[in-house]
Image: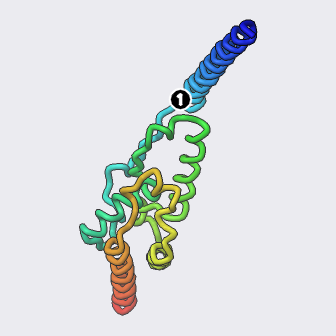
């Protein structure tokens, strides 16, 4: 019986050591993965020539709406992206960069003045629609960036601005055609 007690205590000690070694091995592999991923993505993100330019150049945007767009939209839909630390760690960096690339392809607030007026009106309608349907900002983004969550007042403010800006663009187009 005495031998059984010794054997079980030795087995417990052996099991504890094995768990410690396994934990150390997993931690080491994780550290190696993080360091290697930094080398996979060694270059900093390119800074755009429009990073310091105003949002929606050419649009009539009140400061309250600009503030909402600044905290909820610019990280993905402009060239003013503030890249988080994890955007330099592969494979997460690939996902983040892909999301930002696709967001800018749909709507780039930094290049608003390069769009035709009809495209601007279409995008203003799309902005209002995705906000009304609670599709933007996406839930997965808000989880990591809670400051991007739109309050009901923020949503109303942006939606009302999109309608006013569409009316302004239509009136501007009407005035231009009347002058010709």
For this orientation, the residue located farthest to the bottom is: 178
Q: Nearer the viewer, residue 179 or 151?
A: 151
In the rendered view, would you say 37 is above or below 65? above
Observer able to see residue 176: no
- Tell me which colouring the rendered structure shows: rainbow
For this orientation, the residue located farthest to the front is: 1
At 56% from the left edge and 53% from the top edge, which residue is drawn?
99
Q: Nearer the viewer, residue 62 or 146?
A: 146
Q: Give x and y (percent) for residue 43.
A: 51, 32
Q: Give x and y (percent) for residue 56.
A: 36, 65
At 38% from the left edge and 67% from the top edge, which residue is drawn?
150
* Neighbours of disc 1 within 10 Å: few (<14), some (14-19), many (20+): few
Q: Which secondary structure lies at badge 1?
A: loop
Q: Nearer the viewer, residue 33 or 4?
A: 4
At 32% from the left edge and 54% from the top edge, which residue is drawn?
53
Mark 1 = which residue? Answer: 42
Observer able to see residue 82: yes
Q: How many marks?
A: 1
* Quarter of the image where the N terminus is located: top right
Q: Give x and y (percent) for residue 38.
A: 54, 28
- Residue 94's quadrant in the figure? top right
* Quarter of the image where the C terminus is located: bottom left
In the rendered view, would you say 31 is above or below 72? above
At 44% from the left edge and 65% from the top edge, which residue is drawn?
114
In the rendered view, would you say 34 is above or below 134? above
In the rendered view, would you say 98 is above or below 151? above
Q: Is residue 116 left or right of residue 52?
A: right
Q: Give x and y (percent) for residue 127.
A: 46, 73
């Amino acid at each position: 019986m005495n031998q059984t007690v010794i054997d079980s205590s030795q087995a417990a000690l052996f099991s504890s050591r094995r768990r410690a070694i396994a934990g150390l091995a997993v931690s080491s592999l994780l550290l190696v993965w993080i360091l290697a991923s930094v080398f996979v993505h060694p270059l900093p993100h390119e800074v755009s020539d429009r990073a310091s330019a105003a949002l929606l150049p050419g649009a009539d945007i009140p400061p309250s709406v600009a503030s909402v767009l600044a905290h909820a939209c610019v990280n993905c839909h402009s060239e003013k992206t503030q890249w988080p630390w994890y955007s330099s760690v592969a494979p997460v960096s690939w996902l983040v960069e892909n999301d930002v690339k696709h967001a800018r392809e749909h709507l780039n607030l930094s290049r608003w003045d390069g769009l035709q007026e009809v495209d601007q009106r279409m995008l203003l309608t799309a902005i209002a629609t995705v906000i009304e349907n609670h599709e933007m900002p996406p839930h997965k983004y808000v989880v990591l960036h809670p400051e991007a969550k739109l309050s009901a007042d923020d949503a109303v403010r942006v939606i009302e601005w999109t309608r006013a800006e569409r009316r302004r663009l239509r009136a501007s187009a009407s005035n231009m055609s009347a002058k010709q």
